[in-house]
């Protein structure tokens, strides 16, 4: 009996750890975010049932994220949970890096999408992107990759 309980406990722990590693499977997307500006934006715009959480279902409804003129925005950790995201705009923000590699519905980086993001050092673009718009990375003086 002791061995059985140990196995069940271990399986439960491993299952929980697996869920934490996979951003697309967490119950509340906000728990994987680390930037208060991004959290507040998402709760204000995507928390459809006003429960102070962004469920997988709510995240899947999001097609556009547009945060502009917000120098306090530094991170969009958790953006991969928005699996149906098609467009993004972060111009004139303090964004430092962004990984869109799992956002495969994005086919285009729009005009001025990251314009005036002087703190932006890296952008991971998904293979689905076939076009980068005019001035998408204008004045991104720190961009190296």
Image (tube, grey):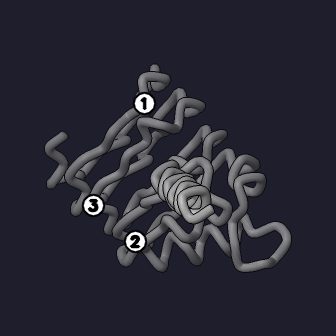
Q: From this viewpoint, is residue 79 visible? A: no
SS category of the residue bearing label 1:
loop
Relative side of 104 to 72, left or right = right
Residue on which disc 3 sits: 96
Q: Label 1 vs label 3: CA separation?
A: 18 Å
SS category of the residue bearing label 2:
loop
Of the two numbered discs 2 and 1 in the rendering, the one whose residue sits closer to the viewer: 1
Q: Are marks 1 and 3 in contact (CB under 8 Å)?
A: no
Q: Earlier in the sequence, mark 2 or mark 1?
A: 2
Label annotation for residue 126 = 1
Residue on which disc 2 sits: 73
User: Which residue is found at the position 20% from the left and 52% from the top?
Assistant: 121
- Within 10 angstroms of label 2, few (less than 14), some, or many (20 or more) residues? many
Outermost residue on the front side: it is 1
Relative side of 57 to 26, left or right = right
Near-viewer residue (52 or 10):
10
Q: Quadrant of residue 116?
A: bottom left
Give the quarter of the figure containing the N terminus.
bottom right
Near-viewer residue (72 or 58):
58
Relative side of 66 to 99, left or right = right
Give the quarter of the figure containing the C terminus.
top left
């Amino acid at each position: 009996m002791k061995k059985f309980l140990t196995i069940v406990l271990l399986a439960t722990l491993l299952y929980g750890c697996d869920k934490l590693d996979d951003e697309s499977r967490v119950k509340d997307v906000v728990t994987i975010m680390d930037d208060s500006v991004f959290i507040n934006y998402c709760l204000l715009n995507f928390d459809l049932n006003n429960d102070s959480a962004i469920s997988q279902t709510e995240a899947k409804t999001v097609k556009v994220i547009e945060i502009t003129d917000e120098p306090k925005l530094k991170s969009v950790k958790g953006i991969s949970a928005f699996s149906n995201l098609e467009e993004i705009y972060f111009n004139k923000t303090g964004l430092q890096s962004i990984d869109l590699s799992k956002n495969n519905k994005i086919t285009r980086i729009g005009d001025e999408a990251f314009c005036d993001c002087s703190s932006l050092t890296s952008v991971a673009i998904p293979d689905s992107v076939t076009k980068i718009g005019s001035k998408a990375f204008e004045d991104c003086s720190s961009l190296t990759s």
